[in-house]
Image: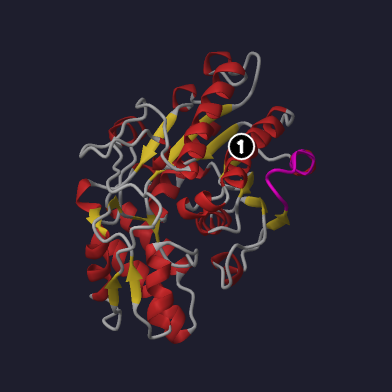
């Protein structure tokens, strides 16, 4: 996979104890990478990171601690960096806007500065969000060159992180000067709503549903008509890894911003998502809870991923129904049997990608 670029390479992941970060750490260790993670303690209990027990170097620290980040880079000398550490929740950003901007903007700057000081670093992928765009809630997807924006503090902080990425690429990591004045290629990656086993974050639809059904309780749905493109967490991760491969191979044209999202058929309302999931766990029960005091959340947000499809050769592997099935079965097995099926899901995903002759999966 990925032209074997990750085997025996030292990879640093910020935010490795989070939902997406733990899945990425699992995948990289399975490919033979030497993985170093820098993050806060797992944000939930249980947590996907803890139940996986990944054989990696895990360092607990705050992305706002610049001196400690620089020390970690000096000590471990990573070659490829995936920056995923973030305050990831919209509703929390209304409660803690200062913290959100400090983590998502200054945290990004701290990582980039540490990369500048570390000669071993060759490739950096900054993972932001589809919410970085100025969302006009139109029916077509946003392209990578559409304006950054953000209604709420979280979305604005991700737009800022993208602007910081562009500034560092233009000022310090300019692709045309690669191999002359610097040795780093920098890209950013934007993805939509990701789901999958092992997410227990507050105020997210799938974790809320799974917690409720495990307790034999009814889940309350606050925004039933909100429409999102739902994709399994492994989908954007395959895009991040494919992008990291290209950067590590010194391919300067890939040092850009990239969207990784599902096909249009995966753009489904929240209430329809619940009904799809009920097909695989029929004891799920829900109630719509209309509260006019809820903070603003976007009703419609889609990405145009044509650039990734054409230039990177990336494409989705699982459709929405498969995504809901795999996700629901993960939680059902965890709560009813006490088993963690993440590695089985990863291996199944890779096999399906090979059957579809997806570029990154071919030997």
Within 10 angstroms of label 1, few (less than 14), some, or many (20 or more) residues?
Answer: many
Q: Is residue 68 magenta?
A: yes
Pinpoint residue 192: horizontal percent, then vertical percent: 37, 47
Residue underneath mark 1: 108
Relative height, residue 279 to residue 248 (above, below): below
Q: Position of residue 318 (x, y in %)?
A: 29, 56
Left-right relation of 125 to 117: left
Residue at (56%, 58%) from the top-left corner?
Answer: 18
Element under disc 1: helix
Q: Residue at x 28, y 34 (%)?
A: 306
Nearer the observer, 314 or 351: 314
Q: Is residue 146 above or below residue 284?
A: above
**Left or right side of 295 for 34:** right
Q: Residue at x 59, y 53 (%)?
A: 32
Rendered image quadrant of residue 49: bottom right
Q: How many marks?
A: 1
Pick the front one: 344 or 58? 58
Is residue 78 rendered magenta in the image? no
Comparing 357 with 160, the one in front is: 160
Occupied quadrant, residue 165: top right
User: Is 100 located above or below residue 310 in the figure?
Assistant: below
Q: What colouring style does the render use?
A: secondary structure
**Residue 104 visible, this orientation:** yes
Which stretch did the figure color magenta? 61-70
Left or right: residue 258 versus residue 4 is: left
Q: Position of residue 26 (x, y in %)?
A: 54, 59
Question: Residue 55 location in percent, x, y?
Answer: 65, 63
Q: In front: 227, or 334?
A: 227
Task: Give the residue drawn at x 41%, y 32%.
Answer: 149
Any part of residue 120 in sight: no
């Amino acid at each position: 996979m990925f032209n074997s670029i990750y085997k025996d390479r030292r990879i640093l992941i910020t935010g490795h104890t989070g939902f997406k970060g733990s899945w990425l750490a699992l995948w990289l260790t399975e490919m033979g990478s030497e993985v170093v993670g820098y993050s806060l303690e797992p944000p939930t209990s249980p947590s996907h990171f803890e139940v996986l027990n990944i054989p990696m170097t895990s360092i607990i620290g705050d992305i706002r601690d610049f001196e400690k980040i620089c020390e970690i880079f000096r000590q471990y000398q990573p070659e490829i960096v995936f920056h995923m550490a973030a305050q990831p929740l919209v509703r929390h950003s209304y409660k803690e806007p200062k913290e959100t901007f400090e983590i998502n903007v200054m945290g990004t700057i701290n990582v980039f500065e540490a990369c500048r000081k570390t000669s071993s670093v060759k490739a950096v992928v900054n993972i932001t969000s589809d919410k970085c765009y100025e969302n006009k809630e139109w029916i077509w997807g946003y392209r990578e060159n559409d304006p950054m924006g953000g209604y709420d503090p979280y979305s604005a902080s991700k737009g800022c992180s993208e602007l910081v990425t562009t500034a560092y690429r233009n000022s310090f990591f300019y692709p045309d000067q690669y191999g002359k004045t610097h040795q780093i290629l920098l890209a950013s990656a934007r993805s939509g709503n990701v789901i999958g086993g092992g997410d227990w974050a507050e105020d997210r639809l799938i974790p809320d549903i799974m917690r409720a059904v495990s307790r034999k309780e009814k889940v309350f749905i606050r925004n039933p008509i909100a429409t999102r493109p739902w994709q399994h967490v492994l989908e954007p991760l395959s895009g991040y890894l494919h992008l990291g491969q290209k950067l590590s191979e010194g391919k300067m044209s890939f040092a850009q911003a990239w969207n990784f999202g599902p096909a249009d058929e995966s753009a489904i309302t929240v209430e329809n998502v619940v009904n799809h999931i009920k097909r695989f766990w029929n004891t799920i029960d829900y109630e719509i809870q209309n509260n006019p005091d809820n903070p603003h959340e976007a009703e419609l947000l889609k990405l145009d991923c044509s650039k990734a499809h054409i230039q990177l050769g990336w494409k989705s592997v699982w459709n929405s129904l498969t995504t809901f099935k795999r996700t629901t079965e993960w939680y059902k097995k965890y709560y009813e049997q006490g088993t963690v099926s993440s590695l089985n899901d990863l291996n199944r995903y890779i096999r399906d990608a090979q059957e579809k002759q997806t570029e990154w999966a071919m030997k």
